[in-house]
Amino acid sequence: MAQILFLVTLFVTLAPIYEAKSFKALVAPIRQLNPSTFVYTITLNQKEKLVIDLESPYSWHHCSKSSPHVSCNVKQCYIARKNQPPCLLQSPKTSCITSPSNLISNSSASSYLSYTNVSIAYTDGHVPFAKANYKLFLSCAPKSLLNSRPIGSSGFASFSSSSLSLVKQFSNSKVPKKFAMCLGEQGVAFFGEGPFYLLPPPGRDITRLLSSTPLITHPSDSLGYYIGLKGISINGEAIKSLRSMLPFVKLVKLSTITPYTTLRSDLYRAVIRQFSKATRGIPRVPNVAPFGLCLNTSNLGSTRVGLPVPQIDLQLIEGGNWTIFGANSMLQVSNDAHCLAFVNGGKRAEQAVVIGTYQMQHNFLLFDLVRFELGFSSLLFFFQTTCNNFNFTSGV
């Protein structure tokens, strides 16, 4: 009996030490809102779903009337209003006025900065453990902005490089400024240091499968994430006409708001032309908007990585290729037809290349804001796992 009491006492004594020293990351579920769209949310406090946004300066959500107002004179207000006129402090109770934006509907509204308590699980990389509690600063959303939000969500979650993003607010002495997202129907987000494991058992540390490339600062002080591009090849053949365009391209934007990879008109035409050439043996079907090349795929069969169509390689300035296989390049539009899921952004597109969520699905992306680099896996099907394979069964 004395031995049992000693072991129980030892376990209780060591448990907090184990938690403090072992957990270097947080974990939360990612969910696809609707199978027909490619909008993804992170779930906080077990029920609140916020759309993942890689470039907003702060998060916003629906607030109750009793939600606290943050004063003008706190540092979080200066950060939230970085590109706006100074907050006029008439009294210590003057609220910090913000302008949250819904980038999907291109709408914005006037609101105020607030804070709320958020619970999120620690993880050892395998399963979630006991919850960590955070005081999270975010903007309250007026009804006008809530009316235009994606159905099923209550706001937007900032994953940007801003000091008010979830990434920065969740970081501390234990959790470094890193985050990973794996977009899937039932995907996963991590904040902090790996290893990170996906099933099947015993699981694979996905961080060991990643290539890496530098994240590039955008000249206009954008809070989003960009990587460098030096070429595109299809079926191993470089698109030669891109050589004259690439000096003016280089930056590739990553977006969780854009559903399909979007290319400036000249780049789009070059990709369509080369992909069409590489698939000339496959019958065509009428195009389905907004896509410019659709194929009759009824007799193609399938492979581990999707339809057996030519792979598309984004040749990065550093770090090798981001390879796009059939599962991420072709979108099914009917029982016997798929379209190349790239979109023409117009000749005056603000960004020449924007990688959308369809091309990110079931790719593991690790954003290291300490080294400012991106780790990427390409399609996880190739490694016989998916973004749906994190074990959310509690470890406590």
Image (cartoon, rainbow, N blue to C red):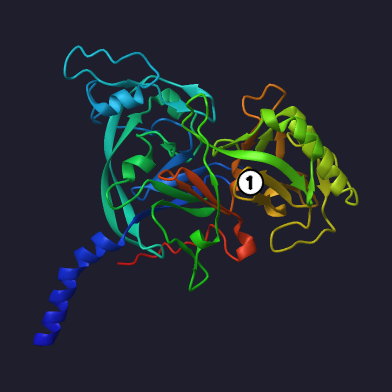
The residue wearing badge 1 is 359
Q: Nearer the viewer, residue 329 or 41?
A: 329
Q: Nearer the viewer, residue 252 or 100?
A: 252
**Residue 387 image offset from top left, x and y in percent:** 54, 57
Any part of residue 260 in sight: no
Q: Quadrant of the N terminus?
A: bottom left
**Residue situated furthest left in the rendering:** 2
Q: Quadrant of residue 277?
A: top right
**Residue 266 image offset from top left, x and y in percent:** 76, 29
Q: Quadrant of residue 91?
A: top left
Q: Quadrant of residue 22?
A: bottom left
Question: How many numbered circles are shown?
Answer: 1
Q: Relative to 277, say whether 89 is above or below.
A: above
Q: Secondary structure at mark 1?
A: helix
- Which residue corresponds to the image point at 74% horizontal and 28% vertical from the top-left? 265
**Residue 258 image offset from top left, x and y in percent:** 59, 36
**Residue 371 image offset from top left, x and y in percent:** 44, 45
Q: Nearer the viewer, residue 190 or 290?
A: 190
* Drawn side of residue 340 relative to residue 13, left or right: right
Any part of residue 270 in sight: yes
- Which residue corresponds to the image point at 44% horizontal and 52% vertical from the top-left? 29
- Which residue corresponds to the image point at 27% horizontal and 34% vertical from the top-left? 115
Q: Nearer the viewer, residue 4 or 272?
A: 272
Q: Relative to 377, say whether 42 is above or below.
A: above
Crowding around mark 1 (Cα neighbors within 10 Å: few <14, some 14 to 19, many 20+) is many
Q: Quadrant of the C terminus?
A: bottom left
**Identity of the amino acid at label 1?**
Gln
* Drawn side of residue 214 relative to residue 269, left or right: left
